[in-house]
Amino acid sequence: MIDLWDLKTLSAATLVIINHNAELIRDYFAREASIIDFRRTSTLRDVIPTNEFRDRVMELEAEVETSIMGDTIRSFHYTRMTDDEVRAIQSHGILMTSLPMFRAKLDAIVAAGRMTQTVSEHVYNNSALVTGDYGERVGTFWATAHPCAINDSGITPFLESWGGEISRWAVEDEAVLENLRVLGKPRVIELAIPIALTGWVVARLAQQIIAVKGHEPRLPGGFGADICIRQPLPPANILRVLTEGDPHFASLGRRYPLTYAERMCDEEE
């Protein structure tokens, strides 16, 4: 299984490709850095130089794509779930987001006495799944191929309210929002996702693998890749569910997983 930030987890075949092209990768990123520096001091009359290594790196990206297609990649899904919902995914795996599934989850919360039917209808009718806001969600499942700290501003909205943006996106009633905030617990689902299910994202994964090689031993700024899949995952692909209070939950994206290295931009930019 590939850890996107750790080249040692790549297959032997992919490592051969990366290591054989190490000089090209270094030259490419050195040239990119010089172009960025030039842009900072250039005027409108200056001709911006091009990266003469770009075409060869694009060919390398395609080669890496083909090499990793049969692998799996460690990924993380940030959410807020009840204990019953955790038991459900551990028994049945990861299902694709749908309106019937969302309706069933709300009905289960109501049946458990943790939400009124009126509030349930308000949440459902204002859901991003119904309104179509906040990007594509129906028929998909989203995760990230790099761990983020749980206090990352891009992550906290998923952990603070049950159902994340699907539930709270257009809700303005503070009483309803408070109900969503007290449901369940913050969780991170750690998964092994087959790269073949990631569609066009495999190109992004290949780019990031090459970028990691070009910035060894540290991760480049802007590192990471979001993953979208459109097929269910069986329970065996759920590696673990980290819950608020678990030792690894707080250290995620810092000291967990153990091989994780912080991005350059975390300290330098």
Image (spheres, helix red, strand yellow):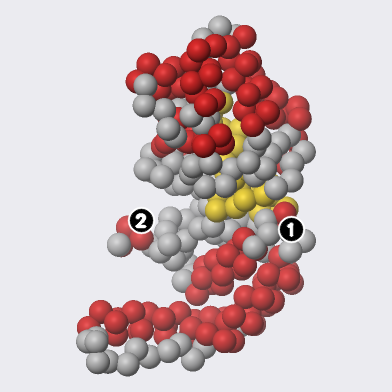
Q: Position of residue 192 (x, y in %)?
A: 69, 47
| Tag 1: amino acid | Ala
Amino acid type assigned to the residue bearing label 2 in the image: Asp
**Where is 253 relative to 110, above or below?**
below
Q: How crowded is mark 1: few (under 14 residues within 10 Å), some or many (20 or more)?
A: some
Which residue shows up at 53% across the image and 81% down it?
25
The N terminus, quarter of image: bottom right
Front residue of this view, candidates 89 and 1:
89
Which element type, helix, strand or loop, lies under badge 1? helix
Badge number at residue 266: 2
- Left or right of 30, for residue 199: right
Using the rendered view, name the quadrant where residue 84 is placed: top right
Crowding near the residue tagged with mark 2, few <14, some 14–19, many ≥20 C-alpha atoms within 10 Å = few
Q: The residue tagged with tag 2: helix, strand or loop?
A: helix
- Give the vertical position of 94 relative to 259 (above or below): above
Mark toward the start of the polypeptide (2 vs 1)? 1
Q: x%, y% of residue 235?
A: 75, 35
Question: Which residue: 24% across, 92% down?
Answer: 45
Q: In which quarter of the image is residue 33?
A: bottom left
Looking at the image, is 193 positioned above or below residue 217? above
| 262 over 91 or under it: above or below | below
Q: Looking at this view, is 242 or 112 the one in front?
A: 112
Q: Which residue is labeled 1 in the image?
A: 196
